[in-house]
């Protein structure tokens, strides 16, 4: 065998051995030992306008929901309505949250609040919370919290979501 063939075989063997050592080396990442958060089988969902959770009172409402999640272990999520800011456009987004089996639905923004106000009476097993608008027809499952100031919105939303969850026995 010539020198270059011996060198190529040696280099190949060393490279293969290096790959095997790298693959077999134990991982140093703490992912396997990291604790995971156990959530309840309950969810609270926020319906917002196109801006999502940016700006107030949406950001304050989202912070209130996150505070409740930390305290109660309920899952929280939000869905932003895209397109025209109308109740008719917000209704399919609300329907999406209801199909996801949200136990509590919170609405921020005139179109979202109007959609919730129009549908709340039909869904007796869901608790609804609106931020701001108090002009809608009352329903047994509908609570309204004030839209400002941000610190009060956060606390009011957190309390309303926790109260709604306790009414559901969660």
Image (cartoon, grey):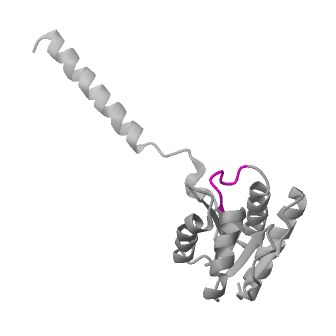
Quarter that holds the C terminus: bottom right
What secondary structure is the stretch in magenta mostly built from? loop
Does residue 152 sit above or below 2 in this rendering? below
- Asked whether the viewer can see residue 104, the reply is no
Q: Which of the 4 quarters of the picture holds residue 67?
A: bottom right
Q: Which residues are magenta?
A: 48-54
Q: Which of the 4 quarters of the picture holds residue 12?
A: top left
Residue at image position (66%, 82%) is 120
> Does residue 107 appear left or right of residue 84 in this picture?
right
- Whether residue 124 appears in magenta in the rendering, the answer is no
Q: Residue furthest top?
A: 3
Q: Return the residue nearer the eye: 71 or 86.
A: 86
Residue at image position (20%, 22%) is 9
> Does residue 131 appear left or right of residue 16 in this picture?
right
Q: Return the residue nearer the eye: 88 or 72.
A: 88
Q: Position of residue 49 (x, y in %)?
A: 65, 57
> Does residue 138 appear left or right of residue 119 in this picture?
right
Q: Position of residue 77 (x, y in %)?
A: 63, 64
- Asked whether the viewer can see residue 55, the reply is yes
Q: Return the residue nearer the eye: 5 or 67.
A: 67
Quarter that holds the N terminus: top left
């Amino acid at each position: 065998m010539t020198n270059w063939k011996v060198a190529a075989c040696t280099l190949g063997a060393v490279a293969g051995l290096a790959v095997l050592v790298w693959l077999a080396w134990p991982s140093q990442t703490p992912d396997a030992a990291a604790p995971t958060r156990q959530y309840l089988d309950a969810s609270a969902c926020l319906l917002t306008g196109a801006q999502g959770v940016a700006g107030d009172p949406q950001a304050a409402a989202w912070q209130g929901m996150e505070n409740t999640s930390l305290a109660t272990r309920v899952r929280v999520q939000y869905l932003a309505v895209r397109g025209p800011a109308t109740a008719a456009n917000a209704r399919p987004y609300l329907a999406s949250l209801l199909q996801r089996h949200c136990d509590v639905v919170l609405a921020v923004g005139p179109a979202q609040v109007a959609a919730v106000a129009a549908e709340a009476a039909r869904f007796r097993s869901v608790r609804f919370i609106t931020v701001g608008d108090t002009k809608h027809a009352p329903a047994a499952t509908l609570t309204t919290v004030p839209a400002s100031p941000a610190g009060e919105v956060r606390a009011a939303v957190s309390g309303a979501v926790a109260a709604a969850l306790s009414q559901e026995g969660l």
